[in-house]
Every structure is written in structure tokens, then in C-alpha cells.
Amino acid sequence: MLQLNIKNETSRLRAVILGIAKSSGPVPKVEDCYDPKSAQHVLAGTYPKEEDMILEMEAVAKVFKKYDVQVFRPIVIEDYNQIFSRDIAFVIEDKFIEANILPDREREYKAINNVISQINPNNVIVLPEECHVEGGDVMPWNEYIFVGTYSGVDYSDFITARTNMQAVHALRDLFPHKIVKSFDLRKSNTDPKENALHLDCCFQPIGKDKAILHENGFLIESEYRWLLNYFGEENVFEVTKEEMYNMNSNVFSISEDVIISEQNFTRLNTWLREKGFIVEEVPYAEIAKQEGLLRCSTLPLVRD
């Protein structure tokens, strides 16, 4: 059996599900896109090619191999996008929680059955139907669980709103010993620079006490300020709007010292190295065109 263990975002990674780009399907129609950035690239004729995305994902797999991380991959579904494994489930402590994601994407969950079958069934949690949640919005951070949400009455108008307050309440019930802290995110169906699709599009804790943060991703300034105060301004890398658009906050931690980052994130990667991190740079700019990057395409199962 797989002994799940996730208490935070940065302890040494031992096992992970990495999405897969093989047979990811044709270029979608604009009306079928789940996010404004994908739609933008479909219209511009710059939507990523499968062969480029395969190379990018294999570069990440190579880094995991270097650090001796056990890597699981989904079973390939013909002509279907299975890159973003973070969306379909998430792990907190020893619980594997199925995300109630967009209905069209349920097949993605079945494609990781090769992993789920190795988990104690008592630890596989299916939330009530009214709880909408995706893994990109959920961040375990020691005694906290940070959750990105959208609490507006027009929630159902936004295909970019993925996690609701019912899910926040359900996580509080599941983990009564944790402090579940929610953050209202800015949503847009049409402008990717005004849309925080998930919490990890505008925030991510790194190392022991540092964070990457983008103020405009948060609807309520006091919630952004809370994070700034919690980590301390001197420990926060503040991302510009352009960097947020390019997904700078969506790096991925192998440990408190080692971070996988996109090779074009020059300003961020320089800052990380100045702060003592080892930065493993990979090409991921094509996958980023779908409004997801490294954290989005990984689902950690076991950390120390």
C-alpha cells in the first residue's frame, strides 16, 4: 500500500503523480476552452503543440529521477488533455481527496486508478456533490490549509471559479485540528491578466518561511496583507502582472532547498538563488499557454 503523507508544500518529495501530454487531443474550439489564456492562444494560432509539451514534461520527469522521486503517470486516454493532474485530486496528511471538478474532466480521475488502487480505501475521500474544489486552490502549510475560493453570488457565471465556500466548510469538517484559511480570488472568463484561476496562480509558499505572491490575484486586500504579514515582506517575492500571466508563482518544490522553475523566469530564479535555493530550470513555456505550470501538473503523494 501507498502510505500517503503531505503536511506542507515543501518537505522532501518522495512520490508524485506527474500529468502526461501524450495524445492530448486537437486544438480546442474557443468555446470549449476552460480558461481565458488557452482561448487567447487558440485565437492567435499559438496553442501549444503536443510534441513540445511532451518534451517539457519529460524534462520535469528527468529532474524527479535525479532526486530519486517515485513518479506515477496517468493511463493515457486517447485525444484527451491529462497534463494538469493537480486539478483532479489532492492529498492532505494521509487522505486522498477527489476533486469535484468540471464534469467533462471526470475521466482524468479514472485514469489515475493505478495509484488510487494502492491507497487504503478508508483514506480516499469523496466530498459531497455541492462542494466544488480543485487541487490548485488547496495548499497544506503545516497547521494551516490555505484555500483559494470565489464567494461571489455570480460564482456560476465564471468557468474560472473552481472552488466554492461549501468546499472550504467541508475541509474544516475533515480537518478540525487545522486552521482552514480561505482567500477570495479575482476571476475573469476573458482576460487572463485579471484572472487567478487557482490560488497557486498568485501565491505559493516555498522553503521554510518564504512565498511568491501577486497582490492583484486577491479580491480582498486584507487577505493579501495577511499573507504578506505572515511570511514577512523580506521573505516574499512579489510577482508583477506580466509574471503572474506567465505563471511565475506556479513553480514546484522538491524540498525546502530545491525548486523546479521555468527557465525564462529570470528575475524569480535569480532571487531564489540569492536566497539559497537550488533552482532546477526546465522549459515549460508551451504548457504555460494553458494557464497552468509546474505545480498544476504535479500531484504530490508522499513527502517526508
Image (cartoon, rainbow, N blue to C red):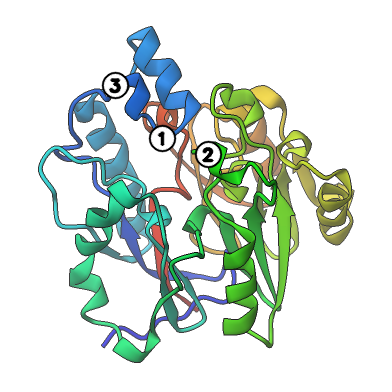
Q: Position of residue 161 (x, y in %)?
A: 56, 44
Looking at the picture, does residue 290 appear above or below residue 212?
above
Residue 274 shows which numbered tag? none
Q: Tell me which residue sits at (29%, 47%) in the image.
A: 104
Q: Tell me which residue sits at (69%, 38%) in the image.
A: 186
Residue 34 shows which numbered tag? 1
Q: Amino acid at mark 3?
A: Lys
* Mark 1, other Cα within 10 Å: few <14 / some 14–19 / many ≥20: some
In this view, the residue in front, 235 or 79, is 79
Q: Using residue 178 as the reference point, say whether residue 132 is left or right of it.
A: left
Q: Quadrant of residue 266?
A: top right
Label 2's element? loop
Answer whether labels 1 and 3 touch (C-beta < 8 Å): no
Q: Position of residue 86 (x, y in %)?
A: 42, 55
Q: Which residue is mark 3?
A: 29
Q: Position of residue 94 (x, y in %)?
A: 45, 84
Q: Quadrant of residue 265?
A: top right
Looking at the picture, does residue 29 appear above or below residue 180?
above
Q: Earlier in the sequence, mark 1 or mark 3?
A: 3
Looking at the picture, does residue 70 appear above or below residue 88?
below
Answer whether labels 2 and 1 touch (C-beta < 8 Å): yes
In this view, the residue in front, 257 or 149, is 149
Residue 160 shows which numbered tag? 2
Label 1's element? loop
